[in-house]
Image (tube, rainbow, N blue to C red):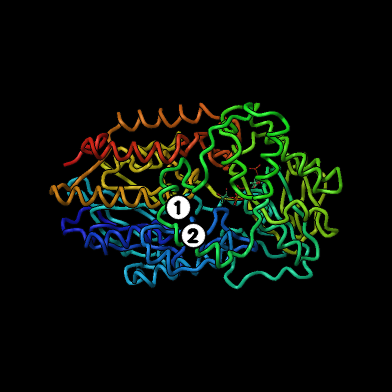
Amino acid sequence: MSNESSAAPQYDVVIIGAGFSGMYMLHRARDLMGLSARVIEAGDGVGGTWYWNRYPGARCDSESYYYSYSFSSELEQEWKWSSRYPGQPEILTYLDHVADRFDLRRDIQFENTVASAHFNDAENYWTLGFDGSDETVTARFVVGAVGCLSLRNTPNFPGLDSFKGDWYHTGAWPHEGVDFSGKRVGLIGTGSTGIQATPVIAAEADHLTIFQRTPNFSIPARNAPLDAETAAEIKANYAEIRQRCRESGHGFPFETIERLASDVSDEERNSIYEALWEQGGFRFLAESFSDLRTDQEANDTAANFIRQKIREMVKDPEVAEKLLPFNHPYGTKRPPIDTDYYDTFNRDNVSLIDVRKAPIEAITPDGVKTADGEYPLDVIVFATGFDAMTGPLLNIDIRGAGGVRLADVWEGGPRTYLGLQVAGFPNFFTVTGPGSPSVLTNMPVAIEQHVEWISDCIAHMNEHGLTRIETTDEDQEAWVQHVSEAADETLFPKANSWYVGANVPGKSRVFMPYVAGMDVYREKCNEVVANGYEGFVTA
Ligand code: NA7
């Protein structure tokens, strides 16, 4: 690949990834701004996360009516969601519909994986190269819409190659599905994915063995069909619902609660938790008390409530004990929500293995070997998550001004200004990058804000005849510091979560998302613009 060409770049904008972010970015750049734009996508269809994660039980933990685009009122009025939480197939059908409705596919290059992105410092454009091809694409601007959870984390257990059965990572599930009937299945990982997959696999398999390293706090989802009356009410009030999402701290249309856990009696607190437990979903965290993620004692009240529920739901006290979370405050790892997760441990064909006590040592030809035994299996499912937030970008050989490698700049953890740009990488924007509220938010809300900010920035540059925009080291360092201080005011850093990169051996421990809230962040981004793109240098 060459960086030397002085021909005009082929595109105004090249977008990496055709998920929620990339699709909207394409629509804005091409249809609303009249720019030449191209999306490069590794898969053979749109959908990003929802294209790859086809595992049994895959479902969104945000409710369908607000886990969707808000940019087109026609789209939101015409689309019909079937249930409270949309399943993966339905979300993918929705995204396929969006691709067709806005005629996006003609500008998406499928089955191409971006391997490199190099900046031409003299002429201010990027050249992108692909895996297994000599083809290159050039663009004035690059938008990394690569997703936060798209680079799979498959632990490097010795012997995996020798396994005689089949193994799968939930994040690259076969399109034709997997038949578990009559099979002895092993599932490694009890994050949101493992918790969703467990009941569905258990119902089909001959036997399911779950290998758990860390028990989690899971809240019932209470999924149900979305009845016609509720759907009509949502549609009638969509403008207000969207407004509430945009103005909220986490992109949800929930009620803002100012009450502290210590403001109420034990009895009242318990009945608040009980009512939210019955309602199901993220409201348990969002609408109970405002200090659950900042005050350990407050957190303990919620954690103890959930532990008691687990004890009540799981009949075998020894199994229940193993399922009790013990090493992180509630809500400091991504809180899962579930359908019948704990009940599944009452089935005869399910066993739970604690691999914290006796770690997995190897995969053998016949199954999984831990420090205290071997478990014969026909199928192994890795629900072991992702190299989150930084992984998908670092998986590309990104070189900025002067050939500086992103991998070197981020060696000690991600450094960004607003999660939108990295100093030394002009004209390269990231959607929901580290340093922005991102994964702590209902994602479409964070995505739309970023895509709109980036589009407006490019429009501003075009209006003013500018060809280069880059943040400064100084502004970036101040932002990195602020992101870190914001996290330190909370309980988040206490957990070994993927938010801090703890799930990937050797990854620098840095709290990556910005915790202060989408509302605060949105205001900051608006201020940056009002102050003439403060923190950026343009030319
Ligand atoms: P997560 O939340 O990262 O969960 C991965 C699970 O896999 C978690 O229980 C891990 O245990 C476990 N894991 C990872 N590596 C190992 C090894 N080496 N041995 C045993 N167990 C291991 O990923 P998910 O796919 O569930 O969820 C990702 C996000 O998708 C989710 O947060 C939502 O935002 C949607 P650990 O907790 O690290 O001890």
Give, as a three-letter code, the residue at label 1.
Ile
Which residue lies under the disc numbered 1? 241
- Judged from the image, the secondary structure of the residue bearing numbered disc 2 is helix
Is residue 264 among the parts visible in the rendering? yes
Question: In the visual, does 79 lie left or right of 281?
Answer: left
Q: Which residue corresponds to the image point at 55% horizontal and 68% vertical from the top-left?
A: 228
Give, as a three-letter code, the residue at label 2.
Ile
- Judged from the image, the secondary structure of the residue bearing numbered disc 1 is helix
Q: Are marks 2 and 1 in contact (CB under 8 Å)?
A: yes
Q: Which residue corresponds to the image point at 46% horizontal and 59% vertical from the top-left?
A: 68
Q: Residues within 10 Å of mark 2 (few under 14, many from 20)?
A: some
Q: Which mark, residue 319?
A: none
Q: Quadrant of the N terminus?
A: bottom left
Q: Residues within 10 Å of mark 1 (few under 14, many from 20)?
A: some
Which quadrant of the structure image shows residue 435?
Answer: top left
Most foreground residue, 315 or 279: 279
Return the residue found at the far left: 465
Most foreground residue, 402 or 290: 290
Which quadrant of the structure image shows residue 113?
Answer: bottom left
Whether 263 is drawn above or below 501: the answer is above
Q: Quadrant of the C terminus?
A: top left
The x and y percentages for residue 314 are 81, 48
Most foreground residue, 227 or 503: 227
The x and y percentages for residue 425 are 30, 43
Ligand 1 under 8 Å from disc 2 Cβ:
no
Which residue lies under the disc numbered 2? 234
